[in-house]
Image (cartoon, rainbow, N blue to C red):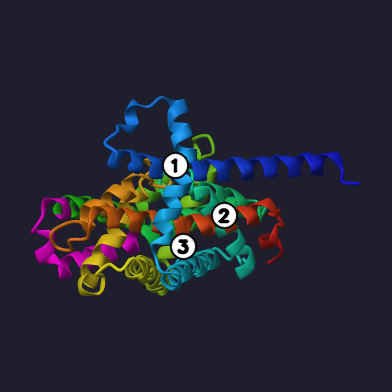
Amino acid sequence: MTPKPNLLKFIFKLAICLILVAWILHTVFAGEAENGLKLEGRNWAELSLVEKFRESWTKGPSSLWKTTSNVELGWLMISLIFMGFTIVIGVIRWRIVLSVQGLKFSFRRAMGISLVAHFFNSFLLGATGGDLLKAYFASEETSHKKVETITTVAVDRLLGLFSMLLFCSILALINWDVVISEKRFMAVMLLVLSMLFLSGMFMMLSFWGGPTNSRLKFELFLKKLPKGASLVRCIEACRSYGEKPSFLPRVLGWSMLLNFACVMQILALGLGLGLDMGSHLLVIMLIVPAVICISALPITPSGIGIRENLYVALLSSTAIGIDQKAALSLSILAFAGSLLWSLVGGIVYFFFRSKNTLDRG
């Protein structure tokens, strides 16, 4: 017979999975229902919570099916494969970050934790909320390097964001005539460049830390604070990355490959919808990372609403001229692909157990 504590844990995890999946589906259905009401000339904001719930679950599923059924199955599968590639490449990059701290995950274990984090990303704020859970589960794998393990998650996210912002900025230079032609592109690029500057400065301070005397004084001050010793260990862990000359090129190289896979995911969906994507490839390579980076800001759950509005605004611009409804369908399909991989992460989470693999590595 299953021991009572294990049974309660099983029920608890099952309840969490079901609630979160229901929440994710409700969010998607609500977005579809809201778009449907707009086409009917009705205002979503005027509905009560009960009416919104009813509209979401009566009109949402059929509307979502109509959107997804418009894409060719072959291109949809290719898009899902590229989405999977982004997760796999992310795992490879994280293992490089872990190795600097002397922490050795197996690829399978790192993949499992990353999928669980992707699952939680679907309802937490921004597109990076799952990193909090990733840090928690990763830290449970060790008893003596918890701070360093948590730091690897933050460093991995920082470098991933920086590389995508850099990728976007390079494409902005290539598409400079497009950027300066419309205010919407200028506004997006100003935000992207601001994020690039801030993330770059934070990375430099974290990895190289400025003058030695000032840094040591700052660390002495931190040690006097509650949990100050852990903060100092975090700083020292970050500095170890700056001491490895080959580290940054390796991580940025894998990150650029990940960025390209993100673009290919959207490109495949566009081709599946019959959109003219090939003749605007360079502009698409600018738009996709810009949308991903801005959607990562902790404003809405999984960046919902922000991502859709950005895709509609940028893809329907004069430079590309894609119909707004088609641009919205493209965005919804991209999120649906991410959602499918999130459900895989939900299954992994259901069977997930801490194993202290790092202490034995």
Residues 227 and 267: in front is: 267
- Quick one: which residue is furthest to the front in this view? 40
Q: Nearer the viewer, mark 1 or mark 3?
A: 1
| Residue type at tag 2 | Leu
Residues 167 and 18: in front is: 18
In this figure, which residue is indicated by the disc labeled 3? Answer: 240
Task: Point out residue 43 in the picture as x, y percentages from the top left corner.
Answer: 30, 32
Characterize the local packing of mark 1: few (<14), some (14-19) or many (20 or more) Cα atoms within 10 angstroms.
some
Q: Residue at x 29, y 39 (%)?
A: 40
Indicate which disc residue 163 carries.
Answer: none
- Specify whether 286 is left or right of 233: left
**Mark found first going from the N terminus, 1 or 2:** 1
Report how many numbered discs are placed on residues in the image: 3
Span shown in magenta? 162-185
Residue 196 visible somewhere in the drawing: yes
Task: Point out residue 132 in the picture as x, y percentages from the top left corner.
Answer: 52, 47
Labels 1 and 3 touching (C-beta < 8 A): no
